[in-house]
Image (spheres, helix red, strand yellow):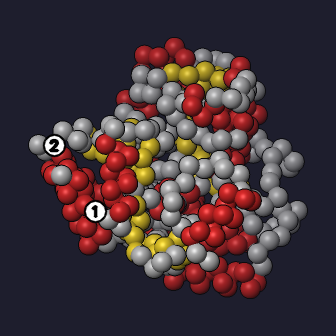
Amino acid sequence: MDMEKVRDLDHQFLFQNYGRQDICFDRGEKEFLYDLDGNRYIDLVAGIAVNVLGYSHPAIVSTVCEQARRLMHVSNLYLVREQAEAAEALASVSPPPLGVSMFCNSGAEANEAALKLAVKATGRARILSTRNSFHGRTMIPLSATGQPKYQSGFEPLVSKAFDFIDFNNVEQLKSAITRDTAAFICEPIQGEGGIIAAKEEFFRTARDLCDERGSLFIVDEVQTGIGRTGKWFGFQHLGVVPDIVTLAKALGGGFPIGACLTSRDIAATFKPGAHGTTFGGNPLACAVARTVIETIKAEGLVERSASLGERWSQQLRALAVGSDLINEVRGKGLMIGLEMGEEAKRFQERALGEGVLVNVTGGRIVRMVPPLIVSDTSISRTNDVLKAFLDR
């Protein structure tokens, strides 16, 4: 099928709810995507921080094929071996007391579950979030999202239950967490908000206040978790352990899965029937998640994300010196943002023409979240494309 036919079918049969670039991919391998004409692209988007092992990784392909032959779906009315194995694998990389999981299908679902769990566990109704945050597009996570552009047209949402403070504002935090607050939900790095990292003081204060006032601390690791930032979880850079962690994206390495991770005591709040999902924790998704975790361990990709990300960030900062087009290089590990203002979209288009895929977030930030297996050669090529853009 050629591009013209794809465009025709897209406009005829699909909702037009995505702002798509005019390109369609046929296959992928390692950190590369190939379009319908066979042109190769270095993919620094990775499905928006999803494909941590790149494309067609032998371990994932093998797991998908083997599990599909055995059992793809069975109801949660029964014990599911692959769920138990995936939960054990996730617990093995999680700091105590985190270690008990419930699986779902996406990040929004994971946040929905976490917020319901917090309300149930505390008996309170108010949720505190931060401005410029993003927690999903279903109604409750959307209500917790601190960006009006995502909420516009869907009001009143569940707005009466949600309060907002400025990200990294410790003084606002001190007065906002009260004995009516069920939970404070926060990202360790705001992804859709522009690759803005939380400060350690902000997270430590949140942890202390939640402990003091009986609230739960939820950390949204949907975009940052599973090695992206150079640690298994973004909160590990910040000296705290939250009460609840939400995961998705990288956890499935390209296969849809989400997870709500917490302690045994908090998890016990949900009795049979309190929450669930038909497809959540299906054997195929859970088998893939286990393989992703085991492969990241075996290949040392968390450590690689830390070292390669630091080296690449230094290279990017060197390129930015003397240029007025890059205002800042920020992020952690292989979650990198270039603040380029109005030039961000222009660079995205230029890079596409040069065979490099990047994404713009927050309207002004070039986001680069490549597979954790990305090669030095691909990074060097990206640097060359950026340098040519800056020198034009």
Secondary structure beneath dot 1 equals helix
Tell me the quarter of the image containing the N terminus.
bottom right
Picture coordinates of residue 272, whole percent (x, y): 86, 49
Q: Residue furthest top?
A: 175
Quarter of the image for residue 323 reads: top left
Please name the residue shown 25% across and 67% down the image: 381
Inspect the image, locate mark 1, and give the three-letter code of the amino acid beneath it: Thr
132 in relation to 108, above or below: above
Q: Is residue 4 left or right of residue 340?
A: right
Q: Is residue 231 visible?
A: no
Side of 321 where 87 appears, left or right:
right
Tag 1 residue: 382
Q: Secondary structure at mark 2?
A: loop
* Residue at 83% in and 70% down: 74
Q: Residue at x 78, y 61 (%)?
A: 279
Where does residue 200 sit, x and y in percent of width and height? 37, 34
x, y percent for residue 73: 80, 71
Query: Could you classify mark 2 by the number of other residues whose Cα lies within 10 Å: few (under 14), some (14-19), or many (20 or more)?
Result: few
The reply, left or right, for residue 87 in relation to residue 130 is right
**Mark-to-mark CA distance, 2 and 1:** 17 Å
Picture residue at 37% right of the left edge, 54% below the top: 349
Q: Amino acid at mark 2?
A: Ser
Q: How many marks?
A: 2
Q: Is residue 155 above or below residue 188?
A: above
In this rendering, is residue 379 above or below 105?
below
Which callout, 2 or 1, points at the residue further toward the start of the chain? 2
- Residue under numbered circle 2: 323
The residue lying toward the viewer, choosing from 134 and 277, is: 134
Q: Please rate how many residues cluster around mark 1, counting C-alpha atoms within 10 Å: few if below 14, some from 14 to 19, many from 20.
A: many
Q: Are marks 2 and 1 in contact (CB under 8 Å)?
A: no
> Is any atom of residue 355 visible in this view?
yes
